[in-house]
Amino acid sequence: MVRPAVYRQKKYDGKIDADVIRTRINSLKPIMVEQATNRFTDLESIESQIKSIVEGTNVATIQIPFYLNVGRQLYKLSNKFSGQTLQNEACLVKQKWVARGLDATLIDQIADLFGIDTTGC
């Protein structure tokens, strides 16, 4: 049975009640801040490692943020996937950034930080 649009609208309207959202956020805020703090710490460490890898080569300074983006994308994938799925997704990230002009060897080194072997991509 197909639900009428009016029913869907009422349900949506009920879910976006400001008081309900405020209550949820207030009760979950300590956990959310704790988890975000942990992620920020991890990202800082990873970005520092990536920057030291990239700065050790003859990469133009303007390209460093792109390599940091590669690392952020791989970080996100490594928290979401594992095994062959992670490998496949990492290969897609590598191919995308190589097509945009980044060095494949440096991307392989960045992937190694996450325990991902992208040399065969």
Image (tube, rainbow, N blue to C red):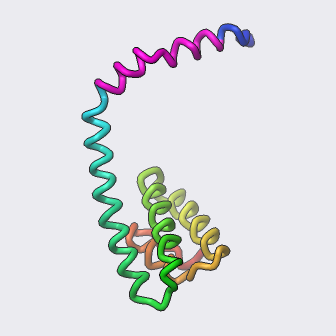
Left or right of 59 in this view: 35: left
Task: Indicate yes or no whether the magenta region holds residue 10.
Answer: yes
- Magenta-highlighted residues: 8-26
The C terminus is located in which quarter? bottom right
Task: Indicate yes or no whether the magenta region holds residue 58.
Answer: no
Left or right of 88 in this view: 113: left
Residue 29 falls in image quadrant: top left
Residue 30 falls in image quadrant: top left
Q: Depth check: 20 or 109 in front?
A: 20
Q: Residue furthest bottom?
A: 58
Q: Depth check: 117 or 108 in front?
A: 108
What is the x, y in percent for residue 88?
57, 62
Left or right of 112 in this view: 27: left
The N terminus is located in which quarter? top right
- Note whether 56 is above or below 62 in the view shown: below
- Note whether 74 is above or below 4 in the view shown: below
What is the x, y in percent for residue 113?
38, 71
Q: Depth check: 84 or 103 in front?
A: 103
The structure residue drawn at horizontal position 48% and vertical position 56%, both measured from the top left corner, is 77
The image shows a total of numbered marks equal to: 0
